[in-house]
Amino acid sequence: MRILGVESSCDETAAAVVEDGRRVLSNVVSSQIAVHRPFGGVVPELASRKHVEAILYVVEAALEEAECSMNDIDAIAVTRGPGLIGSLIVGISAAKAIAYALEKPLIDVNHLEGHIHAAFLDSDLPNAPFVCLVVSGGHTALYYSESLDQPPEFLGGTLDDAAGEAFDKVAKLLGLGYPGGVVIDQLSEQGNPTAIDFPRVYLGKDSLDFSFSGLKTAVVNFVRTHSPLTYRVEDLVASFQEAVVDVLVAKTVLAANMKGVKNVAVVGGVAANRRLRHKFEEKAIDNRWKLYVPPIHLCTDNAVMIAAAGYGVWKRKGFTRDILTLDAVSRWY
Amino acid sequence: MCKINYLSKSADDTVGFAITFAEKLKPGDVVTLWGDMGAGKTTFTRGLAWGLGIPRKCPITSPTFTLVNEYSGRLTLYHIDLYRVQATEDLETLPLREILFGDGVAVVEWPEKLGEVLPENRWDVRIKIVDENSRRIEIEQIGADEP
């Protein structure tokens, strides 16, 4: 089955064609970061109008790259949520219009379930249940899945800020530019991760929830009370990054142990962080896990993962029944 | 004109103070939160949410990426964060007027981004960092239709 995936839940407008949830025929992302950086814009514009301008272009580009036409598409998978309502509506409206006009079936997909699928596109399918850490600018949560076709079970998530948000805000505080996660990842290479002992918040020994707000405040306090001449920014960001990574890794180890699984996936934009990947690779060896991490270009938002997850959702519960009443949901799972 | 001044000693203290302040809120009220990153705007909002009867097991998470989070309690709470908003056209992404002039309580972080949409009737809450844990919280009711 050939599925056209459509994604517009946050800043990225994306479309992709994927066959049977596995074979990637095309992957097009209109990144607003790329569009705005040359003009000095440091934060992508949020306006839904940007999605409206991009959506038909990315769908056409995805079909062209896959060397097929709408006639060759068997179904359309679209992100229903979670995300910004104003942004989600653009992708959903386009998907509905195409589905209705061309009499194609639709599959509505959870964005986070999409992220989870991204981990398995370049590797074998998991042969046993797995635990997955979804970590990005808007989300930080742990899930348990019986299999890739089953809906993920929520185990715990952030009680305040997402990990990626903490990266972005610390980068902004230090005037390091955008996107914050990438800048801090690079600067940290030259920094000492043990230079400053920032707090690790665990919320109790059996908790699978996260809290990063206190860490952000600790960095604010540090910068407020220390002259910039007394520390290196590289050390500061490396120490901050280490505190985030330590908590993410420890909670994932705890979840894997509690669920008794040996398959672990790490997905989402922050999964592109090199220190995080490295620490998880170490833990995988220590704990004899099979570790699944997407390639960098599938960590951030894309439509390949939506098309892939769409195939799984279809196997689980078929097509979306009432296409025209499908609406966006801001929070889901 | 209502003015309140409070010196909070900790994040928990801020939550407790906000729970008490929430008793003053009526349908349609707008609360604007002014303060630097790390001042405790989301912490204050957590207290407001609890004071408005939103279940404590419901995490009041940062709306930085979602722009607006909605919670059901005694009154509906709209938690808006305009941190990522750069241009006024970004505000189109939100049903801002419907929220600000609706029947719920709207809490707005980074209200300086509202520009001319900033409501004339509102509660201004200013949170200033005193030291590592202490915060000076100043609340002022602006343009209220008092008898």
Image (tube, rainbow, N blue to C red):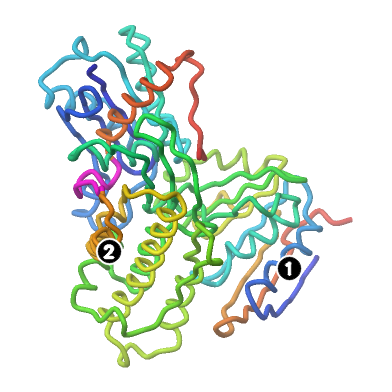
Chain ID of residue with mark 2: A
Residue B54 horizontal/vertical position (percent): 71, 49
Q: Check disc 1 and give the amino acid type.
A: Gly
Chain on which label 1 sits: B
Return the x and y of residue B101 as percentages of the image width and height: 67, 42
Q: What segment is highlighted magenta in the picture?
A: A292-301
Q: Is residue A33 magenta?
A: no
Name the residue beneath numbered marker 2: A286
Q: Whole-Å distance between the Cαs marked 2 and 1?
A: 44 Å
Disc 1 crowd, CA 10 A, few/some/many (<14, 14-19, 20+): some
User: Given the image, on which type of amino acid does mark 2 rest?
Assistant: Asp
Q: Position of residue A306 (x, y in %)?
A: 31, 32
Residue B16 numbered mark, or none: 1
Coordinates of residue A74 in the picture (x, y in percent): 26, 13
Q: Is residue A297 magenta?
A: yes
Question: Which residue is rendered at x = 56% and y = 67% of the image?
Answer: A204
- Residue A217 vs residue A111, the one in the foreground: A111
A278, above or below A155, in the image: below
Q: Residue at x 33, y 70 (%)?
A: A241
A224 up-or-down from A177: above or below: below
Instruction: In the displayed orientation, state which residue is furthest to the right.
Output: B147
